[in-house]
Image (spheres, grey):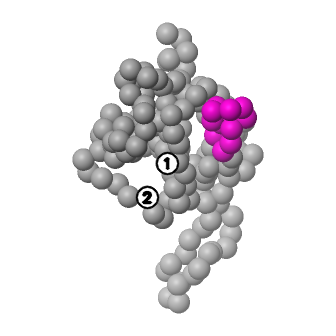
């Protein structure tokens, strides 16, 4: 029960960040998925990016630095995962999920695709869940029977 509460607290913490970046994704062993995500903030430094001709369109870069939290998300196994360029990801109002950056879907097109395109079912490997990590630049879709294990690799300190 304690590990479930810790997982929920870390998911809530990730969802409360203004921005997150995908910093690393890989398989440390066969069919095990490791994802690193990092909190990001608007750079408070002087200077503008792409200023408008009338001086009104000032923007600041979104950055990650030592003041930002860094997380590791591990799936001991997965049925499938996909990484999408954020520019090509589309939302569908018929999908049902909870969360902002770290989403858990109860109904999704990716779940439908996995059910139609693979042998995965409730019988084998068992009840699976669609997780999505919605980052700047990337969207990571994961189907797994295992809940993710999340830990903080760096606890950022507010500047």
Q: Which residue reaches farthest bottom?
A: 53
Q: Earlier in the sequence, mark 1 or mark 2?
A: 2
Residue depicted at x 26% and y 51%: 93
Q: Secondary structure at mark 2?
A: loop
Q: Which residue reaches farthest front?
A: 119
**Depth order, front residue of 16/134:** 134
User: Closer to us: mark 1 or mark 2?
Assistant: 2
* Residue 53 in the image, given as x and y percentages of width and height: 53, 89
Q: Which residue is mark 1?
A: 134
Residue depicted at x 60% and y 67%: 60
Q: Are marks 1 and 2 in contact (CB under 8 Å)?
A: yes
Q: Secondary structure at mark 1?
A: strand
* Residue 52 in the image, given as x and y percentages of width and height: 53, 84
- Which mark is on residue 89? 2
Residue 3 in the magenta stretch? The answer is: no
Q: Is residue 15 above or below residue 83?
A: above
Question: How far, Cα to Cα, is label 1 from label 2?
Answer: 10 Å
- In the rendered image, is residue 19 in sight? no
- Magenta stretch bounds: 25-35
- Label 1, residues with CA under 10 Å away: few <14, some 14-19, many ≥20: many
For residue 75, what is the image quadrant? top right
- In the rendered image, is residue 64 in sight? yes
Q: Is residue 25 left or right of residue 145?
A: right
- Which mark is on residue 72? none
* Residue 103 in the image, given as x and y percentages of width and height: 43, 39
- Label 2, residues with CA under 10 Å away: few <14, some 14-19, many ≥20: few
Q: Is residue 90 left or right of residue 133?
A: left
* Residue 35 in the image, given as x and y percentages of width and height: 64, 40
Residue depicted at x 52% and y 55%: 84
Residue depicted at x 55% and y 15%: 3
Q: Is residue 124 above or below residue 64?
A: above
Q: Which residue reaches farthest top?
A: 1
């Amino acid at each position: 029960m304690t590990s479930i509460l810790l997982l929920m607290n870390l998911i809530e913490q990730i969802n409360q960040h203004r921005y997150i970046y995908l910093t690393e994704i890989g398989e440390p062993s066969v069919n095990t998925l490791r994802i690193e995500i990092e909190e990001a903030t608007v750079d408070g430094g002087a200077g503008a990016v792409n200023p408008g001709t009338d001086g009104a369109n000032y923007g600041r870069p979104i950055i990650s630095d030592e003041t930002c939290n860094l997380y590791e998300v591990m799936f001991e196994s997965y049925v499938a995962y996909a990484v999408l360029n954020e520019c090509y990801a589309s939302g569908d109002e018929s999908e049902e999920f909870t969360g902002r950056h770290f989403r858990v879907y109860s109904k999704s097109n990716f779940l439908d695709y996995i059910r139609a395109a693979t042998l995965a079912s409730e019988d084998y490997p068992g009840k699976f869940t669609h997780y999505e990590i919605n980052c700047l630049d990337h969207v990571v879709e994961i189907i797994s029977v295992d809940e993710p294990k999340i830990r903080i690799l760096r606890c950022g300190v507010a500047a």
